[in-house]
Amino acid sequence: MTPNDVLQLGPYQFTSRLFVGTGKYDTFPLMREALEASGCQVVTVAVRRVNLADKFKESLLDFLDPKRYTILPNTAGCFTAEDAVRTACLAREALGTEWVKLEVLADPDTLLPDPVETLKAMATLIKEKFCVLAYTSDDPVMARRLEDAGAASVMPLGSPIGSGQGILNPANIRLIIERAKVPIIVDAGVGTASDTAIAMELGADGVLLNTGVAKARDPVRMARAMRLAIEAGREAFLAGRIPRRPYPSASSPTEGTIAPSP
């Protein structure tokens, strides 16, 4: 990727297309090292899991350089629209940012997004002048609804949160990307670097991941692999892959060649 390959998200511009979460690391210093290795410019922070009240108590925010990273607060752990809106407002008050990753889950077992509550929360947050990145399923209809509701980015899951199953439905992800007028960031389910490359080769504008790095045997090395996969996948998408063919096509010409000596 070149410095001119810029991703625009609301009022923000980024050259890295890898978004990395801050949960599940064994230690905060390990988290910081992995983030540095990933080359990311945006880190997501679950507002419900961050100490915002006691300034004298250690917080993961102490390990994030605000000059290096743009913090994207998210509403992880919310199961109703009201709770998600309340959490977003808390983040705006505490962190001084208007943008938020909206995440409203249906139940604690599947951790799948709740489409009804997500749309309800979207409507309120847009009225409150938030810049919303909306997490959703890989349903193209729901993706279009969120875009129409004002989402600055739609974030379809590759597979369920933390599952490491990769991109389960590439056909739907591709359809969402082809129909969208806003950036599409694949979010959740990434297990390894090849999953990230596949998402980018489909044409995604970025990938958000957490568990795939945080719970890898070597988080720092995996973070570096994810960075390289983002770059490779983006380059492959921009280059344009050859079409799939049912029959082989010779790499060398079969006509106009010099005949072998008798």
Image (spheres, helix red, strand yellow):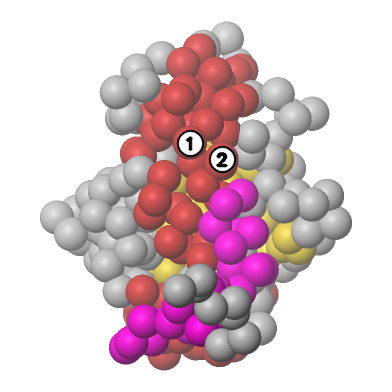
In the picture of the structure, the residue carrying the numbered disc 2 is 227
Q: Position of residue 211 (x, y in %)?
A: 34, 39
Q: Is residue 172 visible?
A: no
Secondary element under disc 2, as helix, strand or loop, is helix
Q: Quadrant of residue 111?
A: bottom left
Q: Residues within 10 Å of mark 2 (few under 14, many from 20)?
A: many
Q: Which residues are magenta?
A: 231-254
Left or right: 13 as drawn, with respect to 205: right
Q: Residues within 10 Å of mark 1 (few under 14, many from 20)?
A: some
Location of the C terminus (image quadrant): bottom left
Residue most extreme to the right? 4
127 and 251: which is toward the camera: 251
Q: Quadrant of residue 96?
A: top right
In the picture of the structure, the residue carrying the numbered disc 1 is 225
Q: CA distance from mark 1 to mark 2?
A: 5 Å
Instruction: Please name the amino acid that badge 2 sits on.
Output: Arg
Q: Is the residue 240 above or below the residue 34 in the image?
A: below
